[in-house]
Amino acid sequence: GNSVTQMEGPVTLSEEAFLTINCTYTATGYPSLFWYVQYPGEGLQLLLKATKADDKGSNKGFEATYRKETTSFHLEKGSVQVSDSAVYFCALSANSGGSNYKLTFGKGTLLTVNP
Amino acid sequence: EPEVTQTPSHQVTQMGQEVILRCVPISNHLYFYWYRQILGQKVEFLVSFYNNEISEKSEIFDDQFSVERPDGSNFTLKIRSTKLEDSAMYFCASSVRGLLTNEKLFFGSGTQLSVL
C-alpha cells in the first residue's frame, strides 16, 4: 500500500537557520506529493505540491523537489522565521485501487523557531 | 480565503456514548472527507463523500461510523458507540473537484475527541 515516512520531531531552530524536513514515500504508480502545514489553532493548509518527477514545488520560501529515484520529497527553507513555527505534514495522493484518490499522510513534524 | 468550519473544537464523552462531529464545508465544494489523527500517529483517511453517498472508506470506518449531509451545508460524522481508541483529532476537509485532479483539500481546524 501507500505510505509516507517523515522525519520525527520536534525540530527546534533559531531564526534564520536552514531547515530540512525529510520525507520519503512508498506508492504504486505515480503519486502526487504535497506538504501541508498546520499553524497553532488552525486547520491543515496546503503549502506546496509537485505532481511529477523532478517538479519543484515552492511557496513562502519553502521548496521541495519530487525525486523519483530516491522516492523523496524533502522540505527545505533557507532562512526560517518565528512565524514558520507549525506542524508540517508530508502527504501523497494516489489511486487506491478504486476510482478515487485519497491523501496518505506522514505523522507530522513539529517545528519551533526561536527568536 | 473561505474556510471549513468544525464544531465543537473539543468533545469529551463517555465510552459507549454516541457522538456527532459537525463540519461546514466551503459552500461551492462537492467532495467531502473525514480524516483523524490519534496522538503521535499519522493522519489517517476515514471516508470520502460525493453526490450524497460514500465514495470510499477505509478499514477504520466500520459499522460504528456514519456520515451524513443532512441539509446541504453541514457534513457530519457520527460514532454510534464510542470506544477508548476513538480518541483522536478528527479533521473535516472539502474540495471542489476531488483529488483526481491533484486539487488541494481545504481542512478544518479539527475536533479533539476524548473518550473516557
Image (cartoon, rainbow, N blue to C red):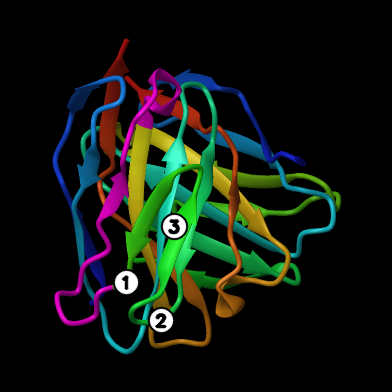
Q: Do marks 2 and 3 share a chain?
A: no
Which residue lies at the image location 18% right of the left edge and 29% below the top edge? A11
Which label's residue is closer to the chain start, 2 or 1? 2
**Residue A61, x across and y down, in percent:** 45, 44
Chain part drawn in magenta: A67-86
Q: Do marks 2 and 1 share a chain?
A: yes
The quarter of the image holding the C terminus of chain B is: top left
Decide: is B61 above or below A94: above
Q: Main secondary structure of the magenta part?
A: loop
- The amino acid type found where label 2 is placed reads Lys
Label 2 residue SS: loop
Q: State which mark lies toward you, 2 or 3.
A: 2
The residue singled out by tag 3 in the image is: B46
Q: Hey, which quadrant is residue B62 in on the image?
A: bottom left
**Residue A103, x across and y down, in percent:** 43, 64
Q: State which mark lies toward you, 1 or 3.
A: 1
Label 3 CA crowd tier, 10 Å (few <14, some 14–19, many 20+): many
Marks 2 and 1 sit apart, C-alpha to C-alpha, by 7 Å
Decide: is A98 above or below A106: below
In the image, residue A73 lies in the stretch drawn in magenta = yes
- Please indicate, yes or no, whether residue B111 appears anywhere in the rendered image: yes
Decide: is A45 above or below A66: above
The residue singled out by tag 2 in the image is: A52
Marks 1 and 3 sit apart, C-alpha to C-alpha, by 27 Å
The residue singled out by tag 1 in the image is: A66
Report if the CB atoms under discs 1 and 3 are less than 8 Å apart. Answer: no
Report if the CB atoms under discs 2 and 1 are less than 8 Å apart. Answer: yes
- The amino acid type found where label 3 is placed reads Leu
**To which chain does the residue with label 3 belong?**
B
**To which chain does the residue with label 1 belong?**
A
